[in-house]
Amino acid sequence: MDMQTNKKKLGLKEKYAHMTRGLDWETSYQSMDKVFPQATFEGIKIHDWDKWEDPFRLTMDSYWKYQAEKERKLYAVLDAFAQNNGHLGITDARYINAIKLFLTGISPLEYVAHRGFAAAGRNFPGVGPRVACLMQSLDEVRHAQTQIHALSNYNKHYDGFHDFKHMLERVWYLSVPKSFFDDAFSSGPFEWMIAIGFSFEYVLTNLLFVPFMSGAAYNGDMATVTFGFSAQSDEARHMTLGLECIKFMLEQDPDNLPIVQKWIDKWAWRGIRVLTLVGMMMDYMLPKRVMSWKEAWEIYFEQNGGALFGDLARYGVKVPECITQCTIDKEHISHQAWATFYQYGGAAAFHTWMPTDDEMDWLSAKYPTSFDKYYRARFTYWRDEAAKGNRFYTNTLPMLCQVCQIPMLFTEPDDPGQICYRESDYEGEKYHTCSDGCKKIFDDEPQKYIQAWLPVHQIYQGNCFPEGTDPTVEGFNPLAKVLEWYHLEHGKDNLDFEGSRDQKNFDTWRGLATKNT
Ligand code: FE
Ligand code: ZN
């Protein structure tokens, strides 16, 4: 039996208030402090949660409607891509390695972002950020799912896509993005919001998404472009949440400024270190390049970020202090990272190669002061040696930075010929970091970073072999056992692109699709 209701239409703002703010209540038989134990330990002071301005007045019902619509479109494109063998339309099969890096290094972290925003939402006593975090949490789980679905089509045809979740937990270079999120997730809710909501979503997201998505577009990968767009339309909301959150902290109490500034400095640096992988992807892994890492850095960080920090200056916020170092690094990091992956190509879950002469010319043009001077000769030498059958692999494991977990591959700010490392003493032990930026982070919270799970240390301690492995047997091959433990199949997932199964299959299938045989 239908009830007669008064059909007064509510305005959007009113409706939103009813559906969000009105849901909050004060506790009675437990103190609020006990219910929200994480709200104060970081030192951030909030006096009035009602001052929070919701950046997006989005109710759950309209949220589901928008997202469902996007989902329908995305899956229609994915279906068409799969049905039409869209994977054969990419520029060349080297490109596929860029999306292996994405699936193993980024997509599982969308899932961690989902958990992190759910936790932040739970831990904020204010109802405004709680609702915003809940929606972002849902967005993030959707990002993880749509990326996995989109890239699963490649898994039917190519190597290296088969066990991304497992690999994230174990493979050496994947500990770089993993530790970034672990660090954020194991901090309090306010630091999480600066780390992910502000630094990552607001300051650095364009440097991650634009290169991968325009890289996909330039290289004919419609599936990736489409999930990129689908995620990117949530990004506007995420960015606004990050910005609102930082402004809210700064407006609530002047004592919050130094804490917030410290987090901005820390997370800008940590984020930029992770983005080394993106820089390398842009300069070396895309057969058809979009722009250089350096150009992307200049547009999305120096210009856009400069405007943002100009805006935040009225709160007393300063540009992150790592910028001087980053201005030097933009000339080098992508080359140094690719050189490292090439040398450790036996232990990576994607293929590596040396650039062709044309590609080296492109690099010289984009990096007129650094590429020819420091990298070209080394790369040419390795390429020539490989052609003679002397492919160079490094057989020892590198020292890792205790904070960003990147191998010591970066150079001194004032000497690109000298590997940079810093040392800290803590409780009688020595710890190593890759830079002044990482050392500062370590020294500020050594108790946290001494717990880091460093892949190389773990390998040397014998913790990265399959169960039941006996390392004392004659002819023991530690690398083979580590790869087994990674679920990485030697000869298929790793080594050179040249001669790989991916290369052969792609050429054969494309030949079948485009020629009479
Ligand atoms: Fe996301
Ligand atoms: Zn570091």
Image: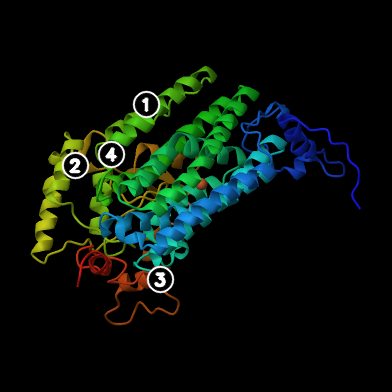
Residue 132 found in image quarter: top right
Task: Report the amino acid beneath label 1.
Answer: Gln
Q: Give the residue drawn at x 18%, y 54%.
A: 354
Mark 4 nearby-residue class (10 Å; few <14, some 14–19, many ≥20): some
Tell me the SS state at disc 3.
helix
Task: Report the amino acid beneath label 4.
Answer: Met
Residue that mark 4 sits on: 291
- The tag earlier along the polypeptide, 1 or 3, is 1
Residue that mark 3 sits on: 485
Task: Report the amino acid beneath label 3.
Answer: Trp
Residue that mark 1 sits on: 303
Q: How is the image coloured?
A: rainbow
Q: Give the residue drawn at x 25%, y 58%.
A: 352
| Residue lying furthest front | 516
Front-most of residues 245 and 459: 245
CB under 8 Å between callouts 2 and 4? no
Mark 3 nearby-residue class (10 Å; few <14, some 14–19, many ≥20): some
Tell me the distance, in whole angstroms, between the alpha carbons under discs 1 and 3.
Answer: 44 Å
- The tag earlier along the polypeptide, 3 or 2, is 2
Q: Position of residue 289 (x, y in %)?
A: 26, 44
Q: Is residue 391 above or below residue 214?
A: below
* Foreground disc of the pair 2, 4: 4
- The tag earlier along the polypeptide, 3 or 4, is 4
Tell me the SS state at disc 1.
helix
